[in-house]
Image: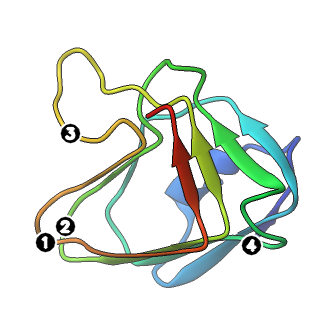
Amino acid sequence: ILVGPGDEWESIIESGQHDIISFSPGKYVGRCGISISHNITLKGVEGSSVTTIDCGNATRHLRLAGQIHVAIEGIAFVNGQVPTSDEGGGCVLAETAVQLEIRGSAFTAC
């Protein structure tokens, strides 16, 4: 599934098992705080220097839960925030059973 900066990047919620969500270069803003409970790959097509997801310090980017494998590659996550009613990461919270693989990505102000 290919998404662009004007698209609703949170379409990852509706993706299927083992889907690859490819992000075209650009800055993605909008709804954050997305929960993922299935195997998925999130990939910046041209790398983290040109692909950014910005949560505007409103909440964290992703919460990963379940016995799943999530791969993140070539995406910069910026301005994540731990919700006041929660603990854990401001960019990505991976619960204990999650296998998380991160390559060529950046996390700033989270």
Q: Give the residue at mark 4.
A: 1
16, 76: nearer the viewer: 76
**Front label number (4 vs 1):** 1
Q: Are marks 4 and 1 in contact (CB under 8 Å)?
A: no
Colouring convention used in this rendered image of the protein: rainbow
Using the numbered discs, state the Cα–Cα distance from disc 4 to disc 1 in whole angstroms.
26 Å
Q: Which mark is residue 66?
A: 2
Viewport quadrant of the N terminus: bottom right
Q: Do the residues labelled 1 and 2 touch (CB within 8 Å)?
A: yes
Q: Which of marks 1 and 2 is nearer the N terminus?
A: 2
Packing grade of label 3 (10 A; few <14, some 14-19, many >=20) is some
Q: Which mark is residue 41?
A: none
The residue under label 1 is which amino acid type? Ala
The x, y position of residue 41, in whole percent, is 54, 76
Q: Nearer the viewer, mark 3 or mark 1?
A: 3
State the mark number for residue 88.
3
Image position of 72 (left or right of 46): left
At x 52% / y 34%, what residue is drawn? 32
Residue type at the position of mark 2: Gly
Amino acid under label 3? Gly
Q: Is residue 48 above or below residue 84?
A: below
Of labels 3 and 2, the one closer to you: 3
Identified by mark 4, the residue type is Ile
Front position among marks 1 and 2:
1
Tell me the crowding category of disc 1: few under 14, some 14 to 19, or many 20 or more residues within 10 angstroms, Cα based: few
N-term mark: 3 or 2:
2
Residues at badges 4 and 3 in contact (C-beta under 8 Å)? no
Disc 3 to disc 2, C-alpha distance: 16 Å
Q: Indicate the position of residue 75 as horizontal and vertical percent values.
A: 65, 60
**Looking at the picture, does residue 82 appear above or below residue 5?**
above
- Asked whether 73 or 65 is in front, the reply is 73
Quadrant position of residue 42: bottom right
